[in-house]
Image: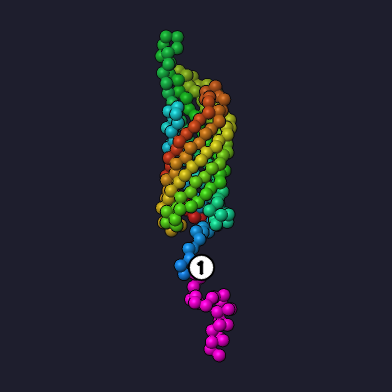
């Protein structure tokens, strides 16, 4: 009678002979799949960017990432809004005399990206690929006289890679990014812009 009760308990609990009644997950000796809970993560970032033309602006950004259930929770969607500005002053000869020319440019990119999250639970890593648009403003001052400011939108494509250290619901991280910005076609600011950026951030799992 006791033997029949024991067999009945194993069937009801979904256990198999030889397995512990309190065991959950894979059988002993099996590898547990890498899973990530579907959640919303928020991340402020601060960094610096470099361009072949000599730009070295500080960058600030805020990113929100939603981890989907795709690929065991590794695939996510990221929305980011950032800003960086550059000021440059040059002295040129004009009609035999030195004239000071100052220029300012500000970029505000808005990016939508596909994110891939991997790594271990304590040392996560993730990458993003995507694009969007940047609002660009430019103006020039020549010998103290201001030219009319110009503004417009340009396309942006980018790819990034980040590595972090998980501390509970928070993950400080470092990120490397390459981005291309289209030509705004301004009189004060012409040509496309390619930047390589390095940023430090703090990712918080909000939900």
The residue at 47%/19% (across/down) is 142
Q: Position of residue 141 (x, y in %)?
A: 48, 22
Q: Quadrant of residue 53?
A: top left
Look at 54% across and 22% down and name the residue there. Answer: 187
Q: Which residue lies under the disc numbered 1?
A: 25
In the figure, 141 relative to 62: above or below? above
Instruction: Name, please, the residue furthest toward the top.
Output: 96
Judge from the rendering whether residue 115 lies leftward or rightward of residue 47; answer left or right. right
Residue 201 can be seen, yes or no: no
Badge 1: residue crowd in 10 Å (few <14, some 14–19, many ≥20)? few
The location of residue 140, given as percent across then percent down, is: 49, 23
Residue 23 within the magenta-colored segment of the rendering = yes
| Front residue of this view, candidates 24 and 85 | 24
Q: Is residue 18 magenta?
A: yes
Q: Please identify the quadrant where the N terminus is shown.
A: bottom right
**Chain part drawn in magenta:** 1-27
Q: Tell me the residue at 42%/45% (across/down).
A: 174
Q: Is mark 1 on a helix, strand or loop?
A: loop
Q: Which of 173 and 82 is in front in this view?
A: 173
Q: Is residue 14 visible?
A: yes
Q: Position of residue 46 (x, y in %)?
A: 44, 42
Q: In this view, does 189 lie above or below 66?
A: above
Query: Along the line of sight, which residue is nearer the eye, 10 or 48?
Result: 10
Q: Could you tell me which residue is drawn at 47 percent across and 40 percent down?
A: 177
The quadrant where residue 149 appears: top right
Say how the picture is coloured. Answer: rainbow
């Amino acid at each position: 009678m006791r033997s029949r009760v024991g067999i009945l308990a194993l069937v009801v609990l979904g256990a198999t002979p030889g397995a512990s009644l309190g065991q959950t997950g894979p059988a002993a000796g099996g590898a547990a799949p890498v899973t990530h809970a579907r959640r919303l993560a928020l991340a402020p970032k601060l960094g610096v960017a470099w361009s072949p033309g000599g730009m070295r602006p500080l960058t600030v950004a805020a990113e929100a990432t939603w981890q989907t259930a795709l690929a065991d929770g590794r695939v996510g969607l990221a929305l980011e809004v950032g800003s960086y500005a550059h000021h440059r002053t040059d002295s040129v000869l004009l009609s035999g005399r030195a004239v000071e020319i100052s220029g300012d440019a500000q970029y505000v990119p808005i990016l939508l990206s596909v994110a891939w999250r991997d790594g271990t639970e304590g040392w996560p890593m993730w990458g993003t690929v995507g694009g969007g648009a940047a609002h660009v403003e430019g103006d020039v001052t020549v010998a103290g006289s201001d030219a009319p400011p110009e503004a417009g939108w340009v396309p942006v494509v980018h790819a990034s890679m980040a590595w972090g250290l998980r501390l509970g619901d928070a993950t400080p991280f470092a990120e490397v990014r390459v981005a291309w910005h289209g030509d705004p076609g301004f009189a004060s600011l012409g040509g496309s812009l390619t930047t390589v950026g390095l940023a430090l951030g703090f990712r918080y799992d909000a939900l």
